[in-house]
Image: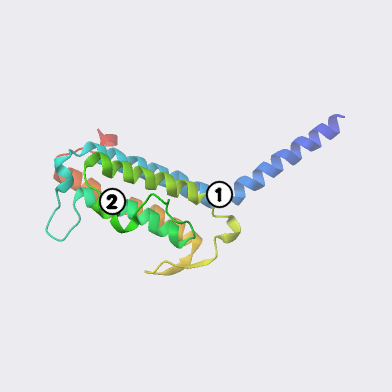
Amino acid sequence: MKMKLTLAMIMLVTVFSVQAQDDLAQSTIQMVLTGNQAQVIQLAEAFSAEQYDWRPMEGVNSVGEALLHIAGGNYYLASKMGFAPPEDVDMMNLGKITGKDNIIAALKKSNAFVLDKIMMVETGQLNEEVDFGFAKMNKLGGLLAMMEHNGEHKGQLIAYARSNGVVPPWSK
């Protein structure tokens, strides 16, 4: 009886270990992206409503536009991998959202959407080629692009914050 129980436990651990390894890339990307998204939201909340219109120069995204660009990028990259944005998201007018609270809500919604979709990409699909419009790459590259895009604009928003006397909340 002890031998059967031991074998059953070994098989159970093996099954869970294989599953964890199958989703290692997706879960790692999701974890890093979750951290980036949280810091972007902290920055978004740290800016005053008036600072949302600030831009470093003409022709460059304002604070609010940069946040909406991240949201749009989340939906765009996911859509190219086969995940249509929610029906209540109007991609053509996403960039027209105004007001600090509305912009933050739109960004949070897009963040939750992509975090959910990352885990829907099966390990066997990671090497499938996708045409993102700006480049052809596999789905793993697309997931990494989501992570990188958020990280890139986190850096942009840190520079915007420092230029406006806003200290990133996690560095206080």
Is residue 115 found left or right of 98 in the rendered image?
right
Q: Looking at the image, what colour scheme do you see?
A: rainbow
Image coords of residue 119 (percent x, y)? 53, 49
Q: Residue at x 24, y 53 (%)?
A: 96
Residue 117 — which label?
none
Helix, strand or loop for disc 2: helix
Image coords of residue 163 (percent x, y)? 14, 46
Q: Nearer the viewer, residue 33 or 80?
A: 80
Instruction: Indicate the quadrant containing the C terminus: top left, top right, bottom left or bottom right.
Output: top left
Image coords of residue 16 (percent x, y)? 66, 42
Q: Is residue 79 above or below residue 171?
A: below
Q: Residue at x 41, y 59 (%)?
A: 77
Badge 1 density bin: few <14, some 14–19, many ≥20, Cα 10 Å: some
Q: Amino acid at mark 2?
A: Leu
Q: Is residue 52 above or below residue 171?
A: below
Lower sequence index among marks 2 and 1: 1
Q: Residue furthest right?
A: 1
Which is closer to the viewer, label 2 or label 1? 2
Q: Residue at x 34, y 56 (%)?
A: 91
Helix, strand or loop for disc 1: helix
Number of callouts: 2
Image coords of residue 153 (percent x, y)? 29, 52
Q: Nearer the viewer, residue 147 or 110?
A: 110
Label 2, label 1: how far apart the Cα atoms are: 29 Å
Q: Residue furthest front?
A: 88
Residue 24 — which label?
1
Residue at label 2? 68
Q: Residue at x 20, y 55 (%)?
A: 61
Q: Amino acid at mark 1?
A: Leu
Instruction: Indicate the quadrant containing the N terminus: top left, top right, bottom left or bottom right.
Output: top right
Q: Residue furthest left?
A: 58
